[in-house]
Amino acid sequence: MLFYLRSFICLLLLVRSAHGQDSTIQYLPVHVVIKLAPLSLLLDPDATIQGGLEVRCSPRNSVQAEVDFGHKGLSVVPDEKQHFADWSIWRVRSEWRHYTGRYRTNSRKNIHIRSPFPLGNYLAIEGFAKQINATKNLVLYDPDPNFPNNQQEISRFVLGSHIKWGRQIAIPGQSLSTLPRVLLDFYLGVGARYGITELTPPIDTSGGGFTYDRFRPGLSNRLQPSLALGLKIGFGL
């Protein structure tokens, strides 16, 4: 009898211990994530308002589409507001991503949580296109018939692609076992881009520095390395 009592007490202790270390998370099914990118407005020289949708297409895969729009009033570069009369920026991105299925790992406590879309680490392939249309004010000390109204029209088209690594997490709520629908998406990517710049009149008026060099045909019309780094805020539906 004493043996069975001891066995029952040991069993209760094991169950209680396992329950105390239970790391199961509860997350209702999500099929669509609405996203905004605040850093594209605050830190990007080509500042834009960016919105996107991520749509689940299988348990570990999704597709994402984004559209950006920007204009002169959003620029964070003071020189551009001074030297350009106007501009507009359109940018579109499309992305396929694969989630690894791992959301939280703690080797010391032997915690390995498997999570469904849209949480955890992911790998992604992204393609993007950007169009910039600008009107540049020119400071001419001598009249020049090549520049009517002392202005130059600039058109720049960029096409590129990135391979990205990222992690999408849920912002912690009041309960550690229940995750809210507000998400943070961090990512880093490397790739290449090709830009074509057209000037009307077709005369290079670029000065020194980063701001004007990106519109110089000799430096723009070629394949260049590209880096993607950002943060998005999402809400799962």
Image: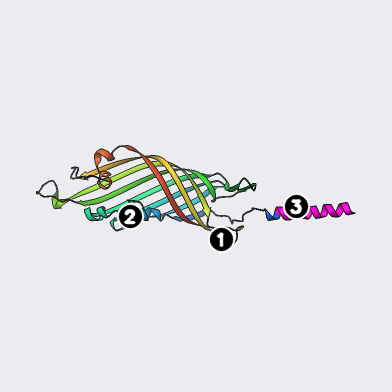
Residue 51 on the magenta span: no
Q: Is residue 185 above or below residue 192?
A: below
Name, please, the residue furthest toward the bottom.
174
Residue at numbered disc 3: 14
The image quadrant where one finds the N terminus is: bottom right
Element at label 3? helix
Task: Identify the residue shown where x is 35% and y is 42%.
Answer: 159
Name, please, the residue furthest toward the right.
1
Residue 237: in sight, yes or no?
no
The answer to whether marks 1 and 3 mark residues whose Cβ atoms lie closer than 8 Å is no
Q: Position of residue 119 (x, y in %)?
A: 54, 51
Separation of marks 3 and 2 at Cα, in angstroms: 60 Å
Which amino acid does the dot numbered 2 rest on?
Gly
Element at label 1? loop
Look at the image and give the residue range highlighted in magenta: 1-18
Q: Which callout, 2 or 1, points to the residue nearer the camera? A: 1
Please give the label number shown on residue 173. 1
Task: Identify the residue shown where x is 53% and y is 46%.
Answer: 121
Label 3 vs 2, first from the N-terminus? 3
Q: Nearer the viewer, residue 76 or 6?
A: 6
Residue at numbered disc 2: 70
Which amino acid does the dot numbered 3 rest on?
Leu
Element at label 2? strand
